Image: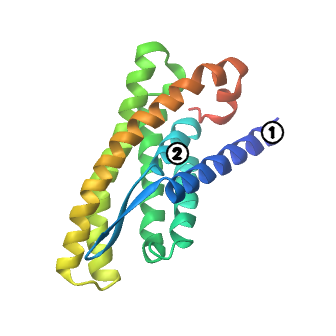
Amino acid sequence: MKTDKRILKLCVTALMAALAYISFTFLKINIPTPGGYTAFHLGNTFVILASLLLGGWLGGIAGAIGMGIGDILDPIYILVAPKTIILKLAIGLITGAMAHKVFKIHTRSGRSLTYAVFLSAGTGMLFNCLGEPIFSYFYTAYILGAPEKAAKSLAAWNALTTCTNAILTIIIASMLYLAVYPRFQKNGLLQKIAPHD
């Protein structure tokens, strides 16, 4: 039985990684800036959804793998893949901690569940809205060696795209989780994949 749960968690993690990759790679609008590229995309949606379903570690790993591979396979973003991997893992850890440690979403229902899910997703995306531009500036300026003006320009654009992406992510990921929650709860799938205290 324990092996079945591990296999199921591995399969759901792989599915979320694949969806993060697909939504980042094929559902994005690239924006060139003097310091590099930024994008409007839906990749974070599946980092958040994975964290709500599986917990922080597996959600973060799914996001880091899916979006990390998306960066590695894209010549525009290959140099920022390490930054992406770190940030997506952190988003997953923060969202998962809020969802499963603070709000304990697997014990809630109704309106209480809805608030907890939206707040958990919002916390992960708030981190991303703050972390992405700051981390992007230091990564671009000090690791990639871009001029300070270019790094600042990229960070400013990143702030705009990240906040837009965050709003869409919170809405879509939360609605997806709330849509699958009753079905997963009814057939016992949620108890097999969700982390429990």
Mark sitting on residue 46: 2
Q: Give the mark count.
A: 2
Which residue is depicted at the point 67% across and 43% down?
12
Which residue is depicted at the point 34% across and 82% down?
143
Mark sitting on residue 129: none
User: Which element is circle 1 on?
Assistant: helix
Which residue is depicted at the point 54% across and 72% down?
72
Q: Is residue 138 left or right of residue 195?
A: left
**Which amino acid does the dot numbered 1 rest on?**
Asp
Disc number lying in front (2 or 1)? 2
User: Which element is circle 2 on?
Assistant: helix
Q: Residue furthest top?
A: 110
Residue 180 in the image, given as x and y percentages of width and height: 59, 26
For the residue pair 100 and 169, the one nearer the viewer reads as 169
Which residue is depicted at the point 31% across and 68% down?
136
For the residue pair 169 and 192, the one nearer the viewer reads as 169
**Which amino acid does the dot numbered 2 rest on?**
Phe
Q: Is residue 14 left or right of residue 38?
A: right
What colour scheme governs how the chains and residues are painted in the rendered image of this protein?
Answer: rainbow
Residue 56 in the image, given as x and y percentages of width and height: 51, 45
Residue 139 in the image, given as x and y percentages of width and height: 32, 74
The relative height of residue 9 versus residue 186 in the rendered view (above or below) is below
Image quarter where the C terminus lies is top right
The residue that label 1 is drawn on is 4
Instruction: Work out how far the residue at label 2 is from the one at label 1, CA to CA, in angstroms.
Output: 23 Å
Pick whichever of labels 2 and 1 is earlier in the sequence. Answer: 1
For the residue pair 49 and 90, the one nearer the viewer reads as 49
How crowded pointer 1 is (Cα within 10 Å; few <14, some 14-19, many 20+) is rated as few
